[in-house]
Amino acid sequence: MSMTISEKILAKASGKKSVTPGEYIVGKIDLAMIHDLTGPLTLNVLKQIGEDKPFDSNKIVIIFDHQVPANSTITAELHKQLRIYAKKYNIKLHDVGRQGICHQILAEEYVKPGMLIVGADSHTCTLGALGAFATGIGSTDMAAAILTGELWFRVPESIKFELKGELKPGVSAKDVILYIIGMVGADGALYCATEFSGDGIEKMSIDSRLTICNMAVEMGAKTGIINPDEKTMKYCNYYGEVITSDKDAEYYKEFEIQLNEILPQVALPHSVDNVKPVSEVEGIEVDQVFIGSCTNGRLEDLEIVARILKGKKVKARTIIIPASPKVYIEAEKRGYIRIFIEAGAVVCNPNCGPCLGGHMGILADDEVCVSTSNRNFIGRMGSPKAKIYLASPQTAAATAIEGKLTSPLRYIGDLI
């Protein structure tokens, strides 16, 4: 029976030869992650159950990323709870100093193709870029997964997005996924596995693939996923057998995207599917630019921003946050951090920052922000009266220089 990569991974995890969309299975978990916001909620559930011993300490990771270092006594107490739990069962903890955005840390250190991964964070789908079936779950489900090592799943229908050709200069993976979400809508892939394929995705870097899969949940998807190739194997340092979709696998829907037709995109307030080309809405005055998050805080993102900002000064206050210590160190080695600071930006330690309105750059009433993050809901980054525009690192950098929403194509000479 022909299957997609998602179906094959769920079949393997449930000990079945095959599964079909709509079928309910119980899968064995290869990796479970909680962070400083969702972890304490999971611990509360475990306390109510009266049992907290994990099924396998080696398959659980705790990562501080949302409010780190602690920004209040409440946060400090929550961090303390997680430290005590990690020490009790010898669970791997990424504490202050080894902290970073959870999805980036997992990609760098833990994920292998074919794994079944659950994370108590909706953007866990990011890790599908490495050929794993990865999805976000709630704290109650996470408590069950930690105790038993298993969780039930409804096998999702798969939607194929075949990306063909090459991107124009100044256009990035972020523009591609914004374009796709604008095309299908915020509910266009409800509980589906969105599979990205084609020669266009094969040409993309792992950083770009992570950006694409990161935002699959913004169209309602259960996961985003890409068949592993040589780039994946090298990134993961994994050279065993891999699971891929059969060529004659059946899909619920299929879309073909010509990459050379995509221009720089922006999602306008207050919905991620309210997408237009940047060129149609240029000139909007901006108070803050945020470059970072689990969508666009990787080295590739910082590199293009450094190329645009080099030798220039920002007009909007600009916050730049590398996604992990590894990304931060490499950015420093390459001189990007110095370029950012000399341009007038502030560079923070690896964490989620202002993306969720909890730390480092909260917006005031009526302020406007261009952000490389993944959500622009009302109140997401602070005041409910603020406006958030989602864009690529290129667009964010051009906007920072001009102080108003600006297409990166104006700086095309710096990008080539």
Image (cartoon, grey):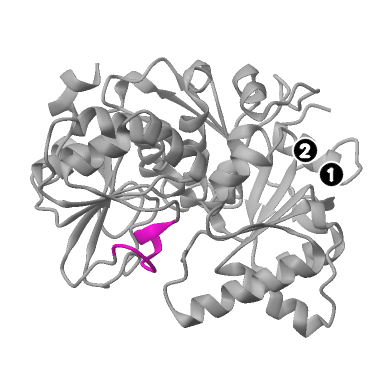
The one nearer the camera, 107 or 113, is 107
Q: Which residue is denoted by mark 1 in the rendering?
A: 13
Whether residue 244 appears in magenta in the rendering, the answer is no
Q: Quadrant of residue 53?
A: bottom right
- The residue under the point 35% across, 65% down is 380
Quadrant in which residue 111 is drawn? top right
CB under 8 Å between discs 2 and 1: yes
Q: Residue at x 64, y 21 (%)?
A: 234
Quadrant for the C terminus in the image: top left
Decide: few, some or many residues near mark 2? Use Cα within 10 Å; few <14, some 14-19, many ≥20: many
| Quadrant where the N terminus is found in the figure | top right
Badge 2 element? helix
Q: Can you say whether 307 is above or below 74 in the image?
A: above
Q: Amino acid at mark 2?
A: Ile
For marks 2 and 1, give the CA distance. 6 Å
Q: Amino acid at mark 1?
A: Ala
Q: Point out residue 246 in the picture as x, y percentages from the top left corner.
A: 73, 23
Side (left or right) of 182 relative to 129? left
Q: Residue at x 50, y 23 (%)?
A: 201
What span is colored magenta in the figure?
352-361
In this rendering, position of residue 168 left or right of residue 242: left
Q: Which residue is mark 2?
A: 9
